[in-house]
Amino acid sequence: MPEVSRSQLVVYAAIAVALLLVGARAIRGEGGAGASFAAADTGGAKGGSFSISGQAGDLVVDVTGAVRHPGVYRMPAGSRVNDAVERAGGSTGKAELEAVNLAARLADGQQVVVPERLAAGAAAAIAADGEEGPISLGTATVEQLEEIDGIGPVTAGDIVEFRDEHGGLSSVDQLDQVPGIGPATMAALRDRLQP
């Protein structure tokens, strides 16, 4: 049997340690399943690199409303609301995309709600009825919000800005994060708004 030199032994040990580290990392991520490896050629023009694309910076978002495939999706960090809508199969023909800030950056655990457009007949019936029902939180304008007791133009603008920054809102209760909205205002908002 040929003798192994000291330098060869060091190289073999380094390779073994690298393989153990990669294996341990793969086992840790998703129980060893679903980790994808991309090994680049270590020689030639491509250069030497090894990367693991896993779930370290991924976000999980719930996409609901007027999309083709509502559900919970894993998105890469830095994704926008538009990316989540596209991942859910895109919007349906009934979607009111103007009510959603498609350019907003996604946050982990966020719910993206794409509201449906009101039919022309339904909107006319609501206007003719004269009795005001709850306003849709996803489509409410600054002017509509100003009609609610305790909401002035500044707070109404803050609500719309908050909604746009978060890619829509799934609950009226999320508005308690807007500066200037206290318990009394939240009660008025719950009575006049719907998600």
Image (spheres, rainbow, N blue to C red):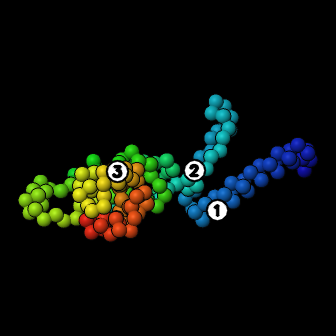
Tag 2 secondary structure? strand
Image mark for residue 7 = none
> Considering only order in the chain, which callout, 2 or 3, is on the residue closer to the N terminus?
2
Relative to 110, is 8 on the left or the right?
Answer: right
Quote the CA–CA distance across marks 3 and 2: 44 Å
Neighbor class of circle 2 (other Cα within 10 Å; few <14, some 14-19, many 20+) is few
How many angstroms separate mark 1 from mark 3 (CA)? 49 Å
Q: Which quadrant: the C terminus?
A: bottom left
What is the crowding at mark 1: few (fewer than 14 residues within 10 Å), some, or many (at least 20)? Answer: few
Q: Amino acid at mark 2?
A: Ser
- Cα distance between the residues tagged 1 and 2: 13 Å
**Residue 51 place in picture, x, y as percent:** 62, 46
Q: Which quadrant of the view contains residue 113?
A: bottom left
Compared across the picture, whether 132 is left or right of 112 comes to left
| Looking at the image, residue 162 lies above or below residue 181 | above
Q: Mark 1 or mark 3: name the one nearer the start of the chain.
A: 1
Residue 53's disc number = 2
Observer-nearest of 128 and 15: 128
Front tag of 3 and 2: 3
Whether label 1 touches label 3, CB < 8 Å: no
Q: Identity of the amino acid at label 1?
A: Arg
Q: Considering depth in this image, is 98 or 38 the residue closer to the camera?
A: 98
Q: Label 3 crowding class (10 Å Cα cut-off): few <14, some 14-19, many 20+?
A: few
Residue at the image point whose x is 63% and y is 58% from the top: 26
Whether residue 86 is visible: no
Q: Label 3 amino acid?
A: Val
Q: Which residue is mark 1?
A: 28
Does any portion of residue 155 appear in the rendered image? yes
Q: Which residue is mark 3?
A: 154
Residue for point 82% across, 51% down:
13
Q: Residue furthest left?
A: 128
Count of marks, rendered view: 3
